Image (cartoon, rainbow, N blue to C red):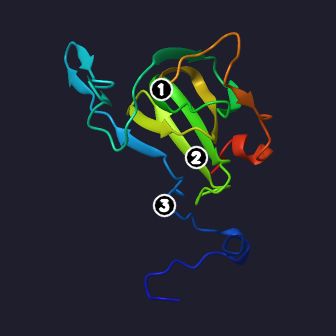
Amino acid sequence: MTPHEIQLAPDYAAALIFETYPAAPPIEGVWTQALRKNRSENGAFMEYLRLGDAGVQDLPGSLTPRQISVSWAAAGRINAFHIHVKAEQNEIWCVLSGQLVVWLVDCREGSASLGTRRKLVLSGEQPTLVHIPSGVAHGYQAGEAGATLIYTMDAQFNLADPNEGRLPWNFFGDELWAEDRG
């Protein structure tokens, strides 16, 4: 024991663990970029995407928008797992209000990050873009206030033949959606 270390009673010392903060596991093609929310006494302004002739500008990857959609998630809602495999459909997500716990799992055969699971917490408090490539399963659970999600796709939704394969919400384990009790 060092001179500044605190001695605990044996029962407490035996149960004590320390949190670790490893880097998020990389998934090939997944990237995030924080957005800048410009605040004033009257409210706030934020650019979501800046578009040019070649698609979205000033991002770590490229995407040519074909559809922009908004989804409202009720409090506690689990919406998982989606995966786009019929044709390429890459997405950029951004939570505008509320909070989503997002899970991404690389399901692409031959991918360097095959099987990698990554958890993200997206919120309207600090809007962040996340790029989700085709073949990466994605799902979310809304926080206690629900959430508003805006997302941009490089393919259009086809109601007659949706490119939205589904895996069961707990396909990668029930523990993904378990409450973090610290």
- Mark 2 Cα shell of 10 Å, populated few (<14), some (14-19), many (≥20): some
Q: Position of residue 107 (x, y in %)?
A: 68, 47
Three-letter amino acid code at the position of disc 2: Lys
Q: Position of residue 10 (x, y in %)?
A: 71, 77
Q: Nearer the viewer, residue 173 or 92?
A: 92
Residue 12 in the figure: left or right of residue 156: right
Q: Identify the residue at horizontal 68%, vertical 24% (top origin).
A: 77
Q: Earlier in the sequence, mark 1 or mark 2?
A: 2
Q: Earlier in the sequence, mark 3 or mark 2?
A: 3
Residue 147 location, quadrant: top right
Structural distance between the alpha carbons of marks 3 and 2: 11 Å
Question: In the image, which is nearer the foreground, mark 1 or mark 3?
Answer: 1
> Residue at label 2?
119
Residue 10 in the figure: left or right of residue 99: right
> Residue at label 1?
154
> Residue at label 3?
23
- Mark 3 Cα shell of 10 Å, populated few (<14), some (14-19), many (≥20): few
Secondary structure of the residue carrying numbered label 1? loop
Secondary structure of the residue carrying numbered label 3? loop
Three-letter amino acid code at the position of disc 3: Ala
Q: Nearer the viewer, residue 11 or 134?
A: 134
Q: Earlier in the sequence, mark 1 or mark 3?
A: 3
Three-letter amino acid code at the position of disc 1: Asp
Question: In the image, which is nearer the foreground, mark 1 or mark 2?
Answer: 1
Q: Look at the picture and state if 43 lies above or below 84.
A: above
Structural distance between the alpha carbons of marks 1 and 3: 29 Å
Q: Position of residue 154 (x, y in %)?
A: 47, 26
